[in-house]
Image: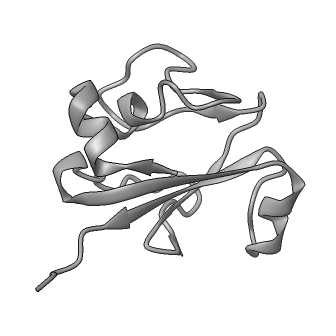
Amino acid sequence: MITSALFTDRGAQNLQETLRYSAGVTADAWGLDTRGDASTIRGLDPVQYVDGMCRLYNFSPMARPEVYGLERVEVLRGPSSMLYGAGAAGGIINAISKRPSF
């Protein structure tokens, strides 16, 4: 789990840069791309989720999540990610949006 304080201190500006120092994750798998967030987990393409809902469906272009609006980014590695429906064998990436607080 990567908290917002951690990737704010690193100066991350996109989802790829938040994943840069996570174990087993290659954040810039094909170089820094301005069109989308491409990364690999254990050499396989992960399924990306936002707030627990699948982000990409059949390569449809969707807006990239804004790092400022994220509370944390969760990375689930390995075969346990298959427990979440259409997860990939390598893992999944779940970006959690900020919620209002008192």
Report the residue that reaches farthest toward the left: 102
Residue 81 position, x and y percent, is 77, 61
Q: Determine whether, in the image, residue 40 is placed left or right of residue 100.
A: right
Report the residue that reaches farthest toward the right: 79
Residue 36 position, x and y percent, is 38, 37
Picture layout, residue 8 above or below residue 34: below
Of residues 50 and 10, the one nearer the viewer is 10
Of residues 61 and 8, the one nearer the viewer is 8
- The residue at the point 71 percent across, 29 percent down is 24
Q: Determine whether, in the image, residue 98 is placed left or right of residue 93.
A: left
Q: Determine whether, in the image, residue 60 is placed left or right of residue 64.
A: right
Residue 43 position, x and y percent, is 77, 28
Picture layout, residue 27 above or below residue 44: above
- The residue at the point 30 percent across, 67 percent down is 97
Report the residue that reaches farthest toward the front: 102
Decide if residue 64 is in sight here: no
